[in-house]
Image (cartoon, rainbow, N blue to C red):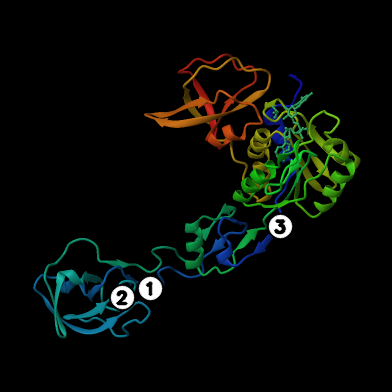
Amino acid sequence: MSGLLSVEEARARLLALFSPVGTESVPLAAAGGRVLAEDAVATRPQPPFDASAMDGYAIREEDHRAGNRLAVIGASAAGARFEGAVRPGTAVRIFTGAPVPDGADRVVIQENTTRVEDSVTLDEAAPGGTNIRPAGGDFMPGDRIAAPRRLAPADLALLAAMNIARPVLRRRPVVALIATGDELAMPGETPGPDQILCSNNFGLKAMLEAAGAEARMLPIARDTPESLTAAFDLAAGADLVVTLGGASVGEHDLVRATALGRGLDLSFYKIAMRPGKPLMAGRLGTTPMIGLPGNPVSAMVCGLLFVLPAVRRMLGLPEEAALRFPARLEAALEPNGPRAHYMMSRAEPEPGGWRIEAFGRQDSSLLSVLSRANALLVRPPHDPARASGDRVEFLWI
Ligand SMILES: Nc1nc2c(c(=O)[nH]1)N[C@H]1C(S)=C(S)[C@@H](COP(=O)(O)OP(=O)(O)OC[C@H]3O[C@@H](n4cnc5c(N)ncnc54)[C@H](O)[C@@H]3O)O[C@H]1N2
Ligand code: MOO
């Protein structure tokens, strides 16, 4: 057992199978959540002119005195500037976002003025800012959003403000999902007496799509080489083929043998991890393949730890150092065996950090437990028994 590959070594070998996919230019409205592949560079300043931050009157600083009465000589609105200049003793009515006219270097808010016909009197000379947003105060030509970057909603708004209508993005990597097993029926079907519902590909699809990939759920492959072969054929063109189940050592676990028969260049099989021991990865021709174990929790945990980093690599994103948080253990744990154990757990905040409790039942078939978990408590191989109050580490899921 101790001869099994460590999680870290397996991850390094697996990532070596991947490189970034190509790029495409995409309409901005469809770019949310996608990965910017080339720096986006502003070609204009924002705002493009000195702009008023308030509704009020544009005046000269020298006229900014309580009781001063100024002649209102025009108006500057957002989208329609006042073409003249503000001279001493005059003011221009101005609105939020409007260009500040020449000569003016302050906007007084209308609440601090009294307007009578064509003149305005300043009620008070309010100290503080000028209420003018300088040209280029947000960004200047040449300012950039650096790639690679997963585009958040605020980035979309910024790209729009920069007038970048079609950013260059990483293509969404296509992941073919092949669930395997004679026992599987699809949700919505009426399962036979010996059947269960196929769940793993739904979990993986949601996980992959949240990470920016496109998941193609292929028809369930039955436990025959022919059916698996047909599924591999259908996966042609994908950037990654992920099989679910059939990874173990029973007579019905045909994934490895069938893939080897199609020329799989196996990088590794079996790792020192619980759940997830029968994980495999390699290359089918030019296409990377990951074989996930069939147990539902194993499939999801291996998806988080191995498939998501592969998607990040295909998206050209830097490898994420697995973010481990320290926590105080709530309930004692038995010594760990030779495999790293990723335990379904609940982490909650407490003053100064986190506390964590691993669920009592950790069997890798228990989706109801996984769905209540928000964290995986990580136990290294041969971790000794842990007492309540010990410091442990966890990952958010
Ligand atoms: N003699 C041994 N038996 C097993 C070993 C071992 O080392 N020696 N390892 C165990 C471990 S650990 C795991 S994990 C599983 C992995 O087995 P497979 O990858 O071959 O998975 P299956 O046998 O196909 O299925 C396991 C289990 O999960 C259910 N399943 C499969 N696919 C789905 C799906 N798409 N949706 C929902 N549930 C699914 C399947 O019905 C089985 O109950 O092997 C152990 N055995
Ligand atoms: O590795 Mo299996 O994934 O322990 O259930």
Image quarter (top left, top right, bottom left or bottom right) of the C terminus: top right
* Residue in the foreground of this view, choosing between 2 and 258: 258
Residue under pointer 2: 100
Residue 49 disc label:
1
Q: Is residue 180 visible?
A: yes
Nearest to viewer (mark 1 / mark 3): 3
Task: Judge depth for marks 3 and 2 and give the one in front.
Answer: 3
Tag 2's secondary structure? loop
Q: Quadrant of ligand 2?
A: top right
Q: Is residue 263 visible?
A: no
Q: Position of residue 343 (x, y in %)?
A: 59, 27
Residue ranking furthest to the left: 67
* Most foreground residue, 305 or 274: 274
Q: Name the residue type under label 2.
A: Val
Residue sitting at x 66%, y 48% = 205
Q: Is residue 384 placed above or below 105 in the rendered structure?
A: above
Residue 124: name its quadrant. bottom left
Residue under the point 82% across and 28% down: 249
Left or right? Give the position of 83 relative to 222: left
Q: Residues within 10 Å of mark 2 (few under 14, many from 20)?
A: many
Q: Give the mark, 2 or 1, whose residue is nearer the N terminus.
A: 1
User: Is 162 situated above or below 324?
Assistant: below
Few, some or many C-alpha atoms within 10 Å of disc 3 (few <14, some 14-19, many ≥20)? Answer: some
Q: Is residue 396 left or right of residue 255?
A: left
Q: Is residue 184 above or below residue 117?
A: above
Question: Which secondary structure lies at badge 1?
Answer: loop
- Relative horizontal placement of residue 4, taking residue 119 as reference (left or right): right
Discs 2, 1 touching: Cβ within 8 Å: yes
Which residue occupies 27% across, 66% down?
A: 131
User: For the residue marked with disc 3, what is the amino acid?
Assistant: Gly
Q: Which residue in the protein does label 3 denote?
A: 22
Q: Quadrant of residue 126?
A: bottom left
